Image: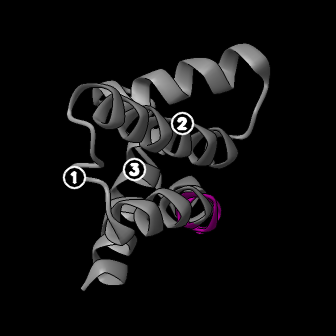
Amino acid sequence: MLIVGAIILAFGVALEIIADLIYIPGEGAVRAVSKKFGFEFGKAKIIFDIAQCIIAVLLGLIFLHKIEGIREGTLITALLVGPLVMVFCKPARAALSKIKFL
């Protein structure tokens, strides 16, 4: 279920990136950083997601004295979504380029 969820999430993010209209806050931050520094979105997303996991672990340890809410699913998703976005962007762009808009 986790892998299916990551695939669906990555497909949605890829469509969001291709549309280039409006972003949810997390993807918007990644998109801004990737545009500013010239990174590919998928690679920037991996770094951003892992950084968020590390920050969550550190904040949990500082304030709660334990790791709360970060488990294997969070880490696997953080590592999978970025590469899957890169995989989905190429064929989705190609398919959309064939569509003629009025």
Q: Is residue 79 left or right of residue 53?
A: right
CA gap between label 2 and label 3 equals 18 Å
The quadrant of the rendering that contains the C terminus is top left
Residue toward you, 70 or 32: 70
Q: Eyeballing the image, is 8 above or below 4?
A: above
Frontmost residue, 80 versus 52: 52
In percent of width and height, residue 49 lies at 49, 43
**Kind of residue at disc 1:** Gly
Q: Is-magenta flag for residue 88?
A: yes
Count the marks: 3
In-image side of 9 versus 68 (left or right): right
| 65 in relation to 11, above or below | above
Secondary structure of the residue carrying numbered label 3: helix
* Residue 47 percent coordinates (x, y): 63, 41
Residue 69: mark = 1
Using the numbered discs, state the Cα–Cα distance from disc 2 to disc 1 in whole angstroms: 15 Å
Mark 3 sits on what residue? 13
One can see residue 96 in this view? yes
State the residue position of label 2: 51
Spatial distance from mark 3 to mark 1, Cα to Cα?
Answer: 23 Å
In the image, residue 100 lies at what x, y percent?
A: 47, 51
User: In the image, which residues are magenta?
Assistant: 84-92
Residue type, numbered disc 3: Val
Residue type pointed to by label 2: Ala
